[in-house]
Image: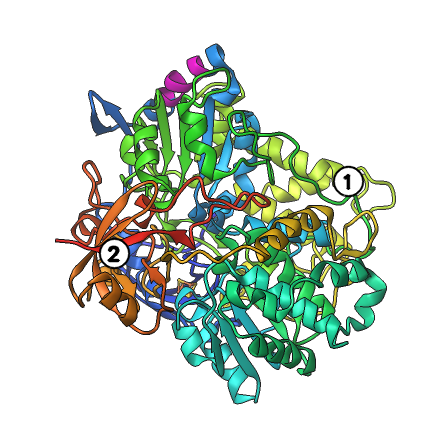
Amino acid sequence: MSDQMDLTAGERTAYRTCPLCEATCGLEITIKDGRAVHVRGDRDDVFSRGYLCPKGTALADLHHDPDRLRRPLVKKEGVFREVSWDEAFAAVQAGLMPLIEKHGKNAVGLYLGNPNAHTMAGALAVRPFIKALGSRNVFSASTVDQIPKHLASGLMFGHPATIAVPDLDRTDYLLILGADPMESNGSLATAPDWPGRLRALKERGGRLVVVDPRRTRTAGLAHWHLAIRPNADAFLLMALVQVLFAEDLARPGRLADHALGIDQMKELSRPFTPEAVEGHTGIPADQIRTLARELAGAPSAAVYGRMGLSTVGYGGLATWLVDVVNVLTGNLDRPGGAMFPTPAHLPKKQKPGGKGWTFGRWASRVGGFPEILGELPAHTLCDEMETPGEGQIRALITIASNPVIGLPNAARVDRALAALDFMVSVDFYVNASTRHAHVILPPTGPLSTAHYDVNFYNMSVRNIAHYSPPVLPMPDDERDKWEIFYKLALIFSGQGSGADVGTLDDFVTAVLVGPATQKPGSPLFGKEAEILAELKLWKGPDRMLDFMLRTGPHGDGFGVNPDGLTLAKLREQPHGIDLGPLEPRIPGILATPSGKIELAPEPMVQDAGRLKKQLGEKVADEPLLIGRRHLRTNNSWMPNIPVLVKGPDRSVLFVHPDDAIRWGLTEDGRAKVVSRVGEVTVPVRITDEIRPGVVSLPHGWGHDLDGVQMATAREHGGVNVNLVTDDERFDPLSQNSALNGVPVRVFPAA
Ligand code: SF4
């Protein structure tokens, strides 16, 4: 659909959802003479009601950043040169196809970064490209982030995207483990204005409890902060389960009819008494009992965990146990507890039962690590690039990612990328990773592409639909990301770089629509031609989204429900549509073969044996390194925006005063942090907000490397924490890298 108005002249106001984090805030953007000159929170946005954080205001700076690439680059004799799109795609074909012909499809690896998930193209149009590539060497940021949640949800509920979120606005009791939403704005629980929602919880008499090795801003707001040792949440949660059973506090209520494995959990948790886990968690036994009693006694309660639980050696177990506690306290799937959203763009499952979900369908070549969600774990990416033999990754495609900053053992990643035969990056910066690329294909800027949060409305604390058309027109010589993906798909499917993207778009649409119109009894039965004709109004992800919305729970069903939702109708609502609070979804949402919640899935039970074994072992007394978040940073995405990096140095090491004395460190002095894989020297900040024996360094820094073409990021370089995180430390169950709780040694530095 083309825009009716001239988007380049005069002054006007545009509205769109912020794509920079999972909070999905509505923005009001003033456009003057074709430039976004001012961004503020959209007070009429149905979800965010005017809230935004400093990153939202910086969206315009990101779009207009002079260092953001507008044209493709091809490296010639070691130097990047701007080329036409035709030349760039021809260079991709010339660089990659001979490698595939000689060594097979697995010779080309793929690494997808986190920002990709925040775009419509990344959510909807990347699949045809991955399918055409046909490589098993697919990796993503999921395995340095949230894969434990997918694993736990897949095993318990039958689908890895069936994720329970805290019912923030109605709960009476919120237990947060390893998350700092006051800084991060939340994750795997989409809610604009977490700070306001947490304050509202307290104002209505609710209780907020935070478990974290550091007194974060969120912990500072809480009624109660328990300063746990890193990587001990699984012990704590298992002890909560033990107390619930031992004190006859387990009250699953109606969930008892829909859950299998309750008795098994009682047996499994039996050894994990509060006294037994005290040394591991650093939390006194009486406090663990109090916490369990409070959770059980609250009128409603939700347990929510994030990165501190996920990115550790027991990430899978801890993430699973969060929902085990939610079930045992009767709080899963009830208002005020942990609930499942009903997004407008996905069919609403009504009947319990299904095929269930599996993982480990294949394994990585070198380490034999299992596939999860079609991906191999990021901790083994370098093994696959460096180890010779059939199936070795000789070329890599990176999408919106910066593995040199984001993956453990960063120096090794840097060396491995430099040694590749060929590298292609879909990215709009020459950053620490893409500087190794031979071809860079930059998608158009964030204000020139449409937006709908395909991934995050499925984890939203309210049911919301909000579509934003492009705010600024895309210049003729730029490309939307979906067009880049489809062009790559055409190259890898053998049709060549000259083939037409529109033809593939039609094909992809037909594949989406066809099966839905061939089911006898379906209201869409026999309407394929008619539906395809109607969808011609749109292109690319817009077209797919229109189909998904119209066949979703509020959709018009292509005429079945004439007042229902369509993309055209949603587009007419610049502030979004509020589809109401979350509603109970059990049992219909359950897709396990049993049609029940599998409370004690076999892989979890097996891994609990590892936890039990450690229960009897001595707790090591070595400093442990953890990360931290800041409101103005977003992983390694936006270090080139001056307003986000100005002010005091944030890439500093937090050290407890007692440890500072013990290690001879002084405030504003420097410390050397040493791990198995490397060392960094970093400024010291002495603070009692960190637990003794734990040090903290934020991630997303360290951009001042040769070849990086991001002036501000280089100037405010900072220290890359992943030079000391270890690619050999990971959770053997979920395969997530253990970026938190890394054993280090700390010394004063000259
Ligand atoms: S909280 Fe997230 S979505 Fe909201 S303005 Fe900030 S970055 Fe954007």
Q: Is residue 470 left or right of residue 332?
A: left
Callout 1: few (<14), some (14-19), or many (20+) C-alpha neighbours within 10 Å?
Answer: some
Is 175 above or below relative to 352? below
The structure residue drawn at horizontal position 20% and vertical position 36%, both measured from the top left corner, is 707
- The answer to whether 724 appears left or right of 100 in the picture is left
Amino acid carrying label 1: it is Thr
Q: Is residue 492 above or below residue 236?
A: above
Residue visible at 37% across and 29% down in the picture:
424
What residue is disc 2 on?
Answer: 641
Tell whether position 263 is magenta.
Answer: no
The local secondary structure at tag 1 comes to: loop
Which range of residues does the magenta coloring cover? 90-99
At horizontal 47% and vertical 18% (from top left) the residue drawn is 496
Q: Which mark is residue 517?
A: 1
98 in the magenta segment: yes
User: Residue 407 location, x and y as percent?
Assistant: 39, 43
Magenta stretch mostly in which secondary structure? helix
Camera sees residue 379: yes
Q: Quadrant of residue 170?
A: bottom right
> Closest to the observer: 712 or 57?
712
Q: Earlier in the sequence, mark 1 or mark 2?
A: 1
The type of residue carrying mark 2 is Ile
Q: Residue at x 67, y 79 (%)?
A: 300
Q: How is the image coloured?
A: rainbow
The disc placed on residue 103 is none
Q: Residue furthest top?
A: 102
Near mark 2 (Cα within 10 A), the count class, few <14, some 14-19 or many ≥20, is many
